[in-house]
Amino acid sequence: MGQQQLPTPSQPTLVWRHLGKQLLTLITIIGMIGMTALLLGMIAAALLAGRNEQRTTADLAIVATPRIFSPALIDQIVNLHDQQLVRGIILVGEGEGELRAALIARGVADSVLIAGPDSLDLRSLSGMAILKRTQSVTVITTPPLQLSTVKFMRDQGLRTYHVPMQGSTFNIRDLLEASLIYWRYVLGQGA
């Protein structure tokens, strides 16, 4: 009995196998870089959330008001105003009208409250701050928007402080969302 010879793969088959391995390696490397960037963004968001610059004086406070806000947010803004830590307060977002009314009812002068855009449009906000000859801002936003908003304001040359929004919770989903929003801004896909 003679030995049977196994068929050898043709040259094109070897090339395709090699290309497949290279492509798999490339996809793996890109995936690892993406996961590392996402993780770094989540760590940065968590570190920022742990910081509180409540006692820092700034020209303006920028408050991103959710549609439904807690009484703790009202207390937080009233305290900033009463302690004269900010000269003006820009209210931005869906809950702006209701929050404005609640703040006025608590004794904050209407002249201190500045209407902002209907949504947290960072480019509009930076333009408003620059027009008012502002050099520093205190940012009060929901957890997913903290990191990108602080980064954007600092990129505009404003001294930017961060105060966590009272009454808002911070969980792993918020960290993930904060990282995605941050990298979208940094990579130039939105602001």
Image: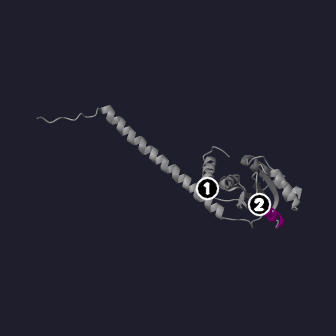
**Picture coordinates of residue 14, whole percent (x, y):** 32, 36
Q: Position of residue 83 (x, y in %)?
A: 82, 67
Q: Residues within 10 Å of mark 1 (few under 14, many from 20)?
A: many
Circle 2 — which element? Answer: helix
46 vs 131, left or right, is left
Question: Where is residue 165 shown, x and y percent of the image?
Answer: 72, 60
Which quadrant, please, contains the N terminus? top left
Q: Residue at x 78, y 63 (%)?
A: 76
Task: Give me the C-alpha separation between circle 2 and circle 1.
Answer: 21 Å
Residue 79 falls inside the magenta stretch: yes
Residue drawn at 59 percent across, 56 percent down? 42
* Residue found 73% across the figure and 61% down from its top: 167
Residue type beneath disc 1: Leu
Q: Tell me the SS state at disc 1.
A: helix
Q: Residues within 10 Å of mark 2 (few under 14, many from 20)?
A: many
Question: Disc 2 residue type?
Answer: Leu
- Taking the spot 45% from the left edge, 47% from the top edge, the residue there is 28
Residue 16, quarter of the rendered image: top left
Q: Which residues are magenta?
A: 72-82
- Given residues 93 and 30, the one toward you in this image is 93
- 149 sits left or right of 89 in the view: left
Earlier residue among tags 2 and 1: 2
Describe residue 17's horizontal placement relative to residue 145 as left or right. Answer: left
- Looking at this rendering, what residue extends furthest in the left direction? 1
187 in relation to 55, above or below: above
Q: Nearer the viewer, residue 135 or 105?
A: 105
Q: Position of residue 142 (x, y in %)?
A: 70, 55
Q: Magenta stretch mostly in which secondary structure?
A: helix
Specify whether residue 153 is painted magenta.
Answer: no
For label 2, the residue is: 73
Q: Which residue is mark 1?
A: 175
Is 167 drawn above or below residue 19 in the view shown? below
